[in-house]
Image (tube, helix red, strand yellow):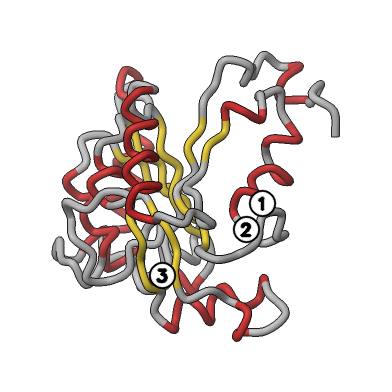
Amino acid sequence: MTNSLPGHQQGLDFSRTTGFALDEYVGLPAGHPESYREVIRREFTNRVNIAAGNVHGPDGTAGDIPAACEAYEHAIAVAGGVDLQLLGVGTDGHIGFNEPGSSFASRTRIKSLIEQTRRDNARLFDRLADVPHHVLTQGLGTIMAARHVILLATGAQKAKAVRDFVEGPVAAICPASILQFHPHATVLLDEAAASGLKLADFYRHTYENKPGWQGL
């Protein structure tokens, strides 16, 4: 696609936008089609009028992983922090690749993936054995520093994770539950993902009667 996309034609301009990816696999060679850098290039950077150099990601090929993580955190800080953080949630409640047990104060670092996450992601690779065991990910502390967080979840397979992080206790076993402490978090669900929520009717009523000044 060219840069003259419908969204751009309607006034959505990315030319002055800077982006920081949440995570990256460790050890995938540069240009691997399932590296997040390539996915973002393929699905986003090439489709809108954003300069490729304005889109950053953790360096999963770095020889010095701790230094690469520290440099990534520094780059986010130099850019003024994250205004809008876009998240999904794993079936085990992870956000980014902060697996259960992650520190709520964590910053960008290397993490080991649990087997459930590797199995969930195997559909994107030729076989499970090809899914890396390690990733670099923005930490929960990094995510919580964003000014606005939007989390999107769809499908019945996410219903338990959604219920746990929205209505369950804030606990390391469900990393996404830390979002209960975020001052400006928006959760967008389809009916299947919302099917386990006890207070679903209340949430619908709240949304339908939101004061106009609240916005998203």
93 up-or-down from 136: above or below:
below
Quadrant housing the N terminus: top right
Q: CA distance from mark 1 to mark 2?
A: 6 Å
Q: Amino acid at mark 2?
A: Ser
Q: Are marks 1 and 2 in contact (CB under 8 Å)?
A: yes
The residue under label 1 is: 39
Q: Residue type at mark 3?
A: Ala
Q: Residue at x 37, y 39 (%)?
A: 71
Q: Crowding at label 2, few (<14), some or many (≥20) Cα neighbours within 10 Å? A: some
Q: Amino acid at mark 1?
A: Val
The CA distance from mark 3 to mark 1 is: 26 Å
Residue at screen point 32% across, 43% down: 70
**Element under disc 3:** helix
Dot 3 alpha-carbon crowd within 10 angstroms: few under 14, some 14 to 19, many 20 or more? many
Image point 41% across, 68% down: which residue?
A: 195
Q: Bin the neighbour count of mark 1 within 10 Å (Cα to Cα): few under 14, some 14-19, many 20 and up.
A: some
Residue 28 percent across, percent down from the top left: 61, 64
Q: Check the picture and name the quadrant holding the C terminus.
A: top left
In front: 153, or 50? 50
Residue 184 relative to residue 4: left or right: left
User: What separation in Å lies between label 2 and label 3 (alpha carbons)?
Assistant: 27 Å
Pair 1/2: label in front: 2
Question: 123 and 156: which one is in front?
Answer: 123
Which residue position holds label 2?
A: 35
